[in-house]
């Protein structure tokens, strides 16, 4: 489009033929009340969406922090109880090894008695 003063209108940007610079002045004559209302609604929608997105990020960050804190607590609890846990495992292994030896000795003696 060509304006009355020789400017070429490109949306809201005006290019003067004598200059190669854009004039970024606001062009109020281009937008109608309906267009402004739609732009305001779109702006509001984008702002709400962005706020909700940031709130979701913050909520996830908070939940992750709680999870990490509980994991740290569990890790510290297990580490503080580690010597007792190792002792119990060691005792259970001794019992299993003892039972296996007893069973093996019994089977071995039984086989010896049958063979000899």
Image (cartoon, helix red, strand yellow):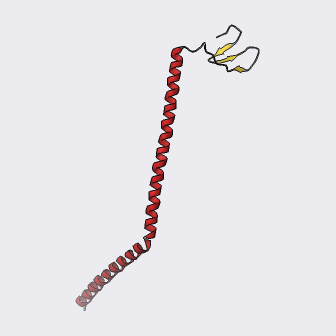
Determine the residue located farthest toward the left in the rendered image.
114
Q: Is residue 106 above or below residue 59?
A: below
Give the position of the N terminus as an image quadrant.
top right
Q: Is residue 52 above or below residue 33?
A: below
Q: Going 47% across and 55% down the picture, which residue do you hit? A: 68
Determine the residue located farthest toward the bottom in the rendered image.
116
Give the position of the C terminus as an image quadrant.
bottom left
Q: In the displayed structure, does residue 57 sit left or right of residue 107? A: right
| Callout count | 0
Q: In the displayed structure, does residue 54 sit left or right of residue 84? A: right
* Location of residue 86 by image quarter: bottom left
User: Residue 77, image x and y in percent?
Assistant: 43, 66
* Location of residue 18 by image quarter: top right
Determine the residue located farthest toward the top in the rendered image.
4
User: Residue 28, image x and y in percent?
Assistant: 61, 15
Q: Going 33% across and 78% down the picture, which residue do you hit? A: 96
Q: Is residue 25 above or below residue 49?
A: above
Q: Going 29% across and 86% down the picture, which residue do you hit? A: 105
* Location of residue 15 by image quarter: top right
User: Residue 64, image x and y in percent?
Assistant: 47, 51
User: Residue 17, image x and y in percent?
Assistant: 74, 14
Determine the residue located farthest toward the right in the rendered image.
18
């Amino acid at each position: 489009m060509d304006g009355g003063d020789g400017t070429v209108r490109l949306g809201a940007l005006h290019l003067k033929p004598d200059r190669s610079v854009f004039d970024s002045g606001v062009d109020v004559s281009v937008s109608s009340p309906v267009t402004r209302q739609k732009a305001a609604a779109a702006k509001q929608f984008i702002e709400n969406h962005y706020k909700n997105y940031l709130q979701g990020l913050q909520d996830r960050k908070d939940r992750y922090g709680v999870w990490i804190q509980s994991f740290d607590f569990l890790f510290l609890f297990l580490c503080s109880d580690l010597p007792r846990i190792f002792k119990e495992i060691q005792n259970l292994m001794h019992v299993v090894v003892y039972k296996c030896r007893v069973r093996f000795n019994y089977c071995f003696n039984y086989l010896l008695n049958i063979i000899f």
